[in-house]
């Protein structure tokens, strides 16, 4: 008789590109989301929560750097043959929601949304397929005053979560200015927007890589192409030297202040109607921010900001953290971008056939948390619950009564529910839970109406610097009346904080 082959056990591992988040990390993220949400609400934005799943048709083809709608997303086909996918951002669902409910929603509609998004991309160090975003958008406001407001709110948000002024800058550009530069350079024909589309795509990607490739690398991509250190060759846009010089002039147009930068941009786009519109919009944004007190120490005009998504139609902005960190090889580098966005007046039009102005920003929550940790500004370790130990399993009701009193007083608490035979294991458990206080009551204490209350935080500090005998003589543990349990625990927690 053939031997039955056993089914192998499944591997206990997370899928590639995904990770698990434990208590302290979840609490840290929630605290940050609450801080961000408070700023958004202060500016009058309302919360919106959309489905994690959208139709592929609704998502469209706006995922960065991909051509096919379902490339880069987690998609599957339903029984009715419709394709659906996990959302890859929070903006595409907003466009669908607004188009679906536009008759009931106020105009302009100001909303913020927070939640996970999914990208079916190759994972890498610090690059996951599921991550959190925190968005704020205004739909239905054609004035660039809405863009200025988003940038001001982004600045306030960064400071609210713990990034001080001087450690960040919000940089603003306008895709209309860039289009004007493209027109002057001869790679954009206003009468035929699809003409030179391939070349423009290469130019946009080249500009976006200025920080990484430097001036020479970008210039090579504007021309014949570039070979990297590994020997791989990337085709260029094929621009002539004169054409490339116009683009390079745009990238170096930043001056000592916004007014001078705008004046230089006006020179570069002379003769382009769309370019002149973009320059005027940048000037308006700069003036609106200036009267509110947002100077170049917080927000600045910077022509190097491009943003990768193809649906941006006007102002674009990016929040960059300017402090230095050490990379995996110990080299100093700036932390980089943690948020970005812009105006996308054509996104809702896909559903309605009518142009609907919209602008918004998206904050990468996980990157922002990583930045705070890199600066030593992460949230303090979350304290665990008070642990009531079990000395006599037959008196579980007494221990549960203690926990109930503590919880009713608003003190986080739990009874040890493992095997109570080894008391040392109970204290080890409390240590793993980062518990600040342990409650101990054996039969003798119960008869006398007292409990032992143990300050685990103080005990750990004493144990680090004293012998066992010295530790025993310290007041990290003391006897109190059972009737004073809540008051004494509250006092001990207060002394720890």
Image: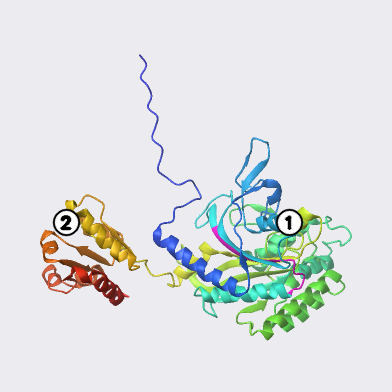
Residue drawn where x is 25% and y is 51% of the image: 418
Q: Position of residue 297 (x, y in %)?
A: 60, 82
Dot label at residue 391: 2
Q: Nearer the viewer, residue 459 or 444?
A: 444
| Whether residue 198 is situated above or below residue 1 in the rendered picture | below
Which label is found at residue 99? 1
| N-term-proximal mark, 2 vs 1 | 1
Locate residue 109: give its quadrant: bottom right
Say which of 391 and 429 sits in front: 391
Whether residue 341 is visible to the viewer of this picture, yes or no, is: yes
Label 1: element kind: helix
Foreground pick, 372 / 396: 396
Q: Secondary structure at mark 2?
A: loop
Question: Which portion, as a residue range, is magenta?
Answer: 132-144
Hey, which quadrant is residue 93 in on the image? bottom right
Q: How is the image coloured?
A: rainbow
Q: CA distance from mark 2 to mark 1?
A: 63 Å
117 in the magenta segment? no
Question: Is residue 140 a member of the stretch shown in magenta?
Answer: yes
């Amino acid at each position: 008789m053939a031997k039955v082959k056993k089914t192998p056990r499944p591997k206990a591992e997370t899928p590639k590109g995904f990770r698990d988040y434990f208590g302290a990390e979840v609490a840290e993220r929630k605290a940050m989301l609450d801080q961000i949400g408070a700023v958004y609400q202060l500016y009058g934005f309302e919360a919106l929560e959309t489905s994690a799943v959208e139709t592929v048709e609704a998502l469209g083809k706006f995922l960065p750097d991909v051509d096919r709608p379902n490339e880069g997303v987690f998609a599957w086909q339903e029984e009715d043959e419709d394709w659906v996918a996990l959302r890859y951002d929070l903006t595409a669902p907003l466009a669908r929601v607004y188009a679906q409910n536009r008759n009931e929603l106020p105009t302009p509609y100001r909303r913020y949304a927070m939640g996970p998004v999914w990208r079916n991309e190759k994972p890498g160090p610090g690059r996951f397929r599921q991550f959190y975003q925190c968005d704020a958008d205004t739909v239905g406001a054609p004035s660039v005053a809405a863009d200025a407001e988003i940038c001001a709110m982004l600045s306030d948000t960064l400071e609210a979560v713990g990034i001080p002024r001087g450690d960040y800058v919000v940089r603003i550009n306008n895709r209309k200015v860039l289009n004007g530069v493209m027109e002057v350079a001869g790679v954009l024909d206003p009468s035929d927007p699809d003409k030179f589309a391939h070349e423009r795509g290469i130019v946009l990607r080249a500009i976006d890589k200025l920080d990484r490739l430097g001036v020479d690398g970008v210039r090579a991509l504007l021309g014949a192409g570039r070979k990297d250190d590994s020997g791989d060759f990337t085709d260029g846009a094929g621009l002539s030297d004169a054409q490339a010089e116009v683009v390079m002039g745009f990238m170096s147009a930043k001056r000592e202040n916004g007014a001078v930068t705008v004046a230089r941009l006006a020179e570069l786009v002379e003769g382009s109607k769309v370019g002149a519109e973009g320059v005027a919009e940048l000037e308006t944004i700069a003036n609106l921010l200036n009267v509110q007190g947002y100077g170049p120490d917080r927000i600045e005009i910077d022509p190097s900001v491009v943003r990768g998504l193809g649906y941006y139609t006007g102002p674009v902005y990016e929040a960059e953290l300017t402090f230095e960190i050490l990379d995996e090889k110990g080299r100093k580098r700036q932390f980089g971008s943690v948020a970005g966005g812009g105006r996308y007046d054509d996104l809702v039009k896909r559903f309605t056939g009518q142009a609907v102005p919209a602008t918004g920003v998206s904050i990468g929550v996980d990157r922002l948390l990583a930045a705070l940790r890199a600066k030593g500004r992460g949230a303090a370790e979350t304290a665990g619950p008070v642990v009531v130990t079990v000395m006599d399993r037959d008196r579980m009701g007494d221990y549960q009564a203690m926990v109930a009193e503590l919880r009713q007083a608003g003190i986080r608490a739990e009874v040890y529910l493992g095997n109570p035979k080894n008391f040392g294991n109970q204290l080890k458990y409390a240590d793993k839970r980062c518990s600040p206080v342990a409650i101990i009551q054996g039969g003798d204490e119960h008869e006398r109406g007292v409990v032992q209350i143990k300050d685990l935080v103080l005990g750990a500090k004493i144990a680090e610097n004293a012998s066992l005998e010295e530790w025993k003589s310290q007041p990290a543990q003391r006897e109190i009346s059972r009737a004073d349990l809540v008051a004494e625990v509250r006092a001990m927690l207060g002394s720890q904080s």
